[in-house]
Amino acid sequence: MRTEEVKKKASETIKGLYANGRVHPLLGKHHSEEAKEKMHNLTNLNRAYWTKFFQDLLSKKYGYSYSEDGKIIINLNSKGGLKC
């Protein structure tokens, strides 16, 4: 039988490990099927927004351009290399 002192010490040790980032709280646990379905639905709900967001981000940062159907357009120079 554990005494209150032992329980308190074990609790503080575990909290310390989580606080220092040594052990992730979800380590060894899994998402339920219901949670996975919910996350999947939220992802698909906002897919068009996020696609546009990342395309704009890459366009600004790297100069990428996209076709109407969302595919990247690669510009090659006369030597067969990418234009910078």
Image: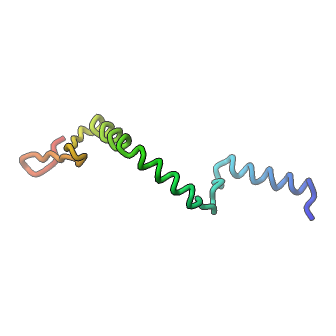
Q: Is residue 62 left or right of residue 32?
A: left
Q: Is residue 12 left or right of residue 55?
A: right
Q: Position of residue 32 (x, y in %)?
A: 59, 60
Which residue is at a point 47% across and 47% down the rendered structure image? 42
Quadrant of res 30: bottom right
Along the line of sight, the residue nearer the viewer: 67 or 8? 67
Q: Position of residue 58 (x, y in %)?
A: 30, 40
Along the line of sight, the residue nearer the viewer: 50 or 15? 50
Image colouring:
rainbow
- All told, the count of numbered labels is 0
Which residue is at a point 63% across and 54% down the rendered structure image? 24
Q: Is residue 23 left or right of residue 68?
A: right
Which residue is at a point 6% across and 47% down the rendered structure image? 78
Which residue is at a point 69% across and 50% down the rendered structure image? 18
Residue that sits furthest to the bottom in the current view: 1
Q: Quadrant of the N terminus?
A: bottom right
Residue that sits furthest to the left in the current view: 78
Q: Quadrant of the C terminus?
A: top left
Along the line of sight, the residue nearer the viewer: 44 or 83? 44
Q: Position of residue 50 (x, y in %)?
A: 38, 42
Q: Is residue 58 above or below residue 11?
A: above
Q: Position of residue 62 (x, y in %)?
A: 27, 39
